[in-house]
Image (spheres, coloured by chain):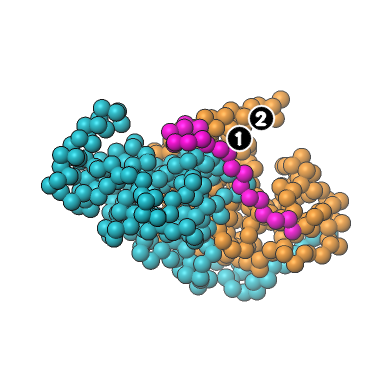
Amino acid sequence: MPSCLHCRTIRVAALCLLLLLNACVADMSGPERHLETSAPARVYDDSTPVQVFDAYTLSTFMGRHAEACAKAGLTPAQLKSAEQQTFAAGDWRPDDYGQALRQRLDLRSFPSLLTGFTNDSQRTHLAPSWQTVQLDKTAYTGRTDDLECTYVVFATADWNGNGVRDWLVLHTQQSPHDRTLRLAFWLVITDPQPKGGLLQAQLLAIDEYEGLAARSIPAGEARDYVAGILNDRILPAAGRPASAPR
Amino acid sequence: MRTTHRIAIMLLSLVLSGCAMQQPVEVLRPDEFSTMATRLRTELVRRGLLDENGAYEPGLPMNSHGEYRPASFGEELYKRLSTRFRMPDAATGGLTPETFAASASPRDDVRIGKGGFVMAQGMDIITVSIIAVTDWNGDGVNDWLLVCRVKPLLGNGPRDYYLAVDNVTAEGVLQPKIIAIYDCQDGTCVLVTGKARKDVLGFDPEHPYVDATPGDQVTLPPGSPAPTGGVHEDRRVEEQSLAN
């Protein structure tokens, strides 16, 4: 069953990360402990009302991720009933999602081609190499000489069930040097706060469009997939040596 | 470092202490101090932390001077060290997280040790460790020497930031100064100090701010059709319904 394969990949990846982390901490003196990071305070005790900006993309998304959407309360019936709800005072719904993504999205928070064109200090679209092509209420398009990116926030809802509104984003990447390949990333911006830090994205899946062919890469295989594409095609096309560690 | 090695260095430093003004160094991570001493030898000799033979004078714990010392450097650095040396903030503030603790999301894996911490955040593994306690700026008060290593799971790296926190007190955010950056790109590593830090960082470490005001110039790629919708026309978000 494909879903079981998926689980196993994630489990193996998690184990590898755990071993790597243990190796890093092992040489420090004193005992090591795992820290629970603080979760944001709940805004809604029961269900968080859903905001829809692009109904077509949302229905595509719901078709593709039906199980996860049902878990997050994103079903057509629930969407309809959610419309009558009112928004709580502490619920951050900015007027300008495009600008927030441009200024504050951590481009290294998910596996993508951006990892090959960012570094520790240049990890948002505010880095000088980025030019704004389009900036909108719910969308942003930016480009450098080596990469073009678009973002569309198509809905917001409480995806991870912690009572805080998350943003559902369709994000595309394309190299101007290799236009046969287009990548679409289904992202969730988890627990965005109005101030005090970068926006972190969680990857749900990558859609690959190669000419007329299309296929989907689950999140668990995304890192290996991106490393391969970066080293074999995108970095050489941009005149850079392959550098992404496998 | 092997014990015999360390004894040799101690003896050497005892012999030499008579002829050179040397600052005692309390080394908390011998492996990291050794790497730092190799990469930044000239600077450490200039500041009197190493003698001309590369030996240091092991210092005593400085509690006798009433200086602040936390029970766990790891917890202290995680909760209080500013992240602003890594990336610029907006002049109005709020674009980047103030501390590592503030930057952590519930999905990040954070491990705290006595001498530092490790956090797995997105595509990066970030390690912050205390290397040594010594008087770095020569004002008679001890300072902390740190290393922040950012090791990417994808893309260029790793990068080591060598940091000094002057005259540490018990309260507030710890604002480090970047001594040097050891940066690896496309398989080549360089040590960067002084004005050249700006080229690696992409911003001036003495003025770590970026203009984030929405005066964004829209630049169209060559040969592209005009986009629909301007930048600043009606910023309000309109909601629409799936049920219609």
Q: Which residue is mark 2?
A: A7
Secondary structure, mark 1, is helix
Q: Magenta segment range?
A: A22-43
Depth check: give the residue in front, B153 or B239: B153
The residue shown at (25%, 43%) is: B57
Depth check: give the residue in front, A83 or B175: B175
Q: Is residue A138 left or right of residue A224?
A: right
Q: Is residue B82 visible?
A: no
Among the chains pictured, the one given cyan colouring is B
The residue shown at (52%, 30%) is: A19
The amino acid type, in three-letter code, at marker 1 is: Gly
The residue shown at (30%, 28%) is: B2
Q: Colour of chain A?
A: orange
Q: Which residue is mark 1?
A: A220
Depth check: give the residue in front, A211 or B205: B205
What separation in Å lies between label 1 and label 2 (alpha carbons)?
8 Å
Q: Which mark is residue B88?
A: none
The amino acid type, in three-letter code, at marker 2 is: Cys
Mark 1 and mark 2 in contact? Answer it, CB < 8 Å.
yes
Residues at marks 1 and 2 on the same chain: yes
Residue that sits furthest to the bottom in the current view: B233
Give residue A168's position: percent from left, percent from top: 67, 52
Would you place residue A67 above or below residue A13 in this image?
Answer: below
